[in-house]
Image (cartoon, grey):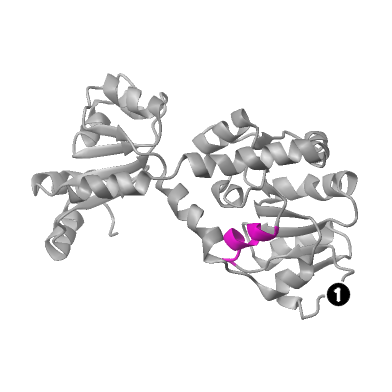
């Protein structure tokens, strides 16, 4: 999309001639929305999440509330978002859930595999550390060494794959680590840690896991928890998860766990090593995907109607 200016918005709409416009979650482009409204082009917001601290609901938020009125219909993820919009006199709203759930539910069905990962993991239990940052990695290695038996494999897929970051991870972990780009088949069984040094594999890597650690929870917020739970992996993440409805629900159900330090991570890993605790957490993680599908169909049905 071009920058959100009045000129750009008018020009873009003239060129694209859209019959419908769909914005997702937090995308509030003032000039595009106002020009679409003036052109009487049906405009929708999907997968939206609203919280009481958003500016729309402040006494001085009148200008921003006007933006919400430019949508012909708003599809929210949850009941609390719907109630907030009702309080500011919006009625063209409904709950459709998070369309990302429908997408990730398809990943296991696609059946994609990586032969080198198959060889690396073999039949061993595996921890997948996805989208990690240095704040996660600084205590991850010690917790793994303390809590998990030597037969466990560990795959680390950092958020940042700059060479300096990869080298820093290599220094933190023992000599049993190898980069994905250095693998050859058959993979030597002496390697316990696999460092993913590319982008695009992570959502499929969870297929090989038993437990997932999701990075970002010691920074601005956790990364994607839906991708691991679609494979039934219990998820562990840091304390910055409050903006993510799925994370809050996973904690409530027992499919997700938040940790604030190394000791809590060790404790949580040890809990999930107990067979009954693991099976319960895995079932409740997977249940979130099963119970929250169907949002895409609801939205499409409304649009075609």
Residue at the location (69% across, 49% down)?
Answer: 212
Seen in the picture, residue 261 relative to 27 is either above or below; the reply is above
Residue at the location (12% across, 61% down)?
Answer: 14
Image coords of residue 153 (percent x, y): 81, 59
Seen in the picture, residue 270 relative to 169 is either above or below; the reply is above
Judging depth in this view, the residue of 18 and 148 nearest the camera is 148
Image coords of residue 281 (percent x, y): 68, 38
- What secondary structure do most residues of the magenta stretch adopt? helix
Q: Is residue 5 magenta?
A: no
Seen in the picture, residue 288 relative to 204 is either above or below; the reply is above
Circle 1 sits in a helix, a strand or a loop, which is it?
loop
- Residue under circle 1? 188
Judge left or right: residue 7 versus residue 238.
left
Seen in the picture, residue 262 relative to 138 is either above or below; the reply is above
Image coords of residue 214 (percent x, y): 65, 47
Judge left or right: residue 279 versus residue 145.
left
- Res. 28 in view: no
Write the start and end of the magenta stretch as one range.
199-208
Judging depth in this view, the residue of 54 and 271 nearest the camera is 271
């Amino acid at each position: 999309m071009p920058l959100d200016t009045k000129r750009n918005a008018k020009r873009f709409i003239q060129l694209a001639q859209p019959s419908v416009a769909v914005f997702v979650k937090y995308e509030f482009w003032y000039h595009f929305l106002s020009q679409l409204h003036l052109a009487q082009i049906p405009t929708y917001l999907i997968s939206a999440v609203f919280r009481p601290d958003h500016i729309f609901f402040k006494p001085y938020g009148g200008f921003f509330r006007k933006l919400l009125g430019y949508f012909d219909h708003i599809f929210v993820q949850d009941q609390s978002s719907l109630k907030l919009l009702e309080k500011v006199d919006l009625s063209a709203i409904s709950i459709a859930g998070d369309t990302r759930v429908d997408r990730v539910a398809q990943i296991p069905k696609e059946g994609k595999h990586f032969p080198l990962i198959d060889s690396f993991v073999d039949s061993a239990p595996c921890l997948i550390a996805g989208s990690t940052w240095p704040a996660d990695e600084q205590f991850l290695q010690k917790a793994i060494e303390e809590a998990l038996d030597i037969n466990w494999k560990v795959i680390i897929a950092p958020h940042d794959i700059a060479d300096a970051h990869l080298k820093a991870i290599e220094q933190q972990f023992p000599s049993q680590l190898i980069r994905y780009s250095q693998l050859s088949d058959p993979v030597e069984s002496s390697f316990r840690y696999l460092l993913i040094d590319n982008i695009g594999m992570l959502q499929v890597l969870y297929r090989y896991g038993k437990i997932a650690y999701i990075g970002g929870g010691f920074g601005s917020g956790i990364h994607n928890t839906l991708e691991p739970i679609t494979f039934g992996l219990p998820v562990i993440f840091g304390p910055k998860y409050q903006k993510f409805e799925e994370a809050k629900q996973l904690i409530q159900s027992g499919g997700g766990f938040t940790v604030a330090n190394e000791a809590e991570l060790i404790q949580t890993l040890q809990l999930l090593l107990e067979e009954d605790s693991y099976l319960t957490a895995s079932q409740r993680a997977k249940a979130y995907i099963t119970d929250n599908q169907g949002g895409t169909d609801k939205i499409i049905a409304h649009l075609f109607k």
